[in-house]
Amino acid sequence: MAKPVVDRIAQQVQDRAELIRVNVATPAGLDVARLYDIRATPTLLVFDGQGNVVYTHVGIPNAGAVVG
């Protein structure tokens, strides 16, 4: 069975970035979803070193677009 796209992205960026999954069905995850106005899942947010969102993708992400 193929790895999910998010797992492949995590593996490809493991030396350069940290990938954090948030379960929006939990109270803490719902707080995160509200903070970043996440209205659908999956949603991928990429942050720069200062904590600014620099890339957003709603739906299953394309690993090449994220990692590239």
Image (cartoon, rainbow, N blue to C red):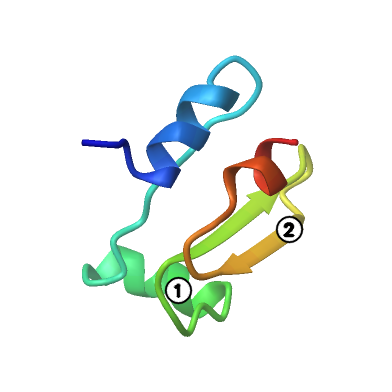
Which corner quadrant of the image does residue 30 belong to?
bottom left
Q: How many marks?
A: 2
Q: Residue furthest front?
A: 1
Secondary structure beneath dot 1 equals helix
Q: Is residue 2 left or right of residue 41?
A: left
Quarter of the picture containing the N terminus is: top left
Spatial CA span between label 2 and label 1: 16 Å
Q: Type of residue at label 1?
A: Ala
User: Which is nearer the N-term, disc 2 or disc 1?
Assistant: 1
**Residue 3 image offset from top left, x and y in percent:** 31, 36
Quarter of the picture containing the C terminus is: top right
Q: Nearer the viewer, mark 2 or mark 1?
A: 2
Q: Residue at x 62, y 66 (%)?
A: 57
Depth check, front residue: 58 or 22 = 58
Secondary structure beneath dot 2 equals strand
Residue on which disc 2 sits: 55
Which corner quadrant of the image does residue 63 belong to?
top right
The answer to whether the residues at label 2 and label 1 have Cβ atoms under 8 Å apart is: no
Crowd class of label 2 (few under 14; some 14 to 19; many from 20; radius 10 Å):
few
**Residue 41 image offset from top left, x and y in percent:** 40, 73
Seen in the picture, residue 30 relative to 53 is either above or below; the reply is below
Residue on which disc 1 sits: 33
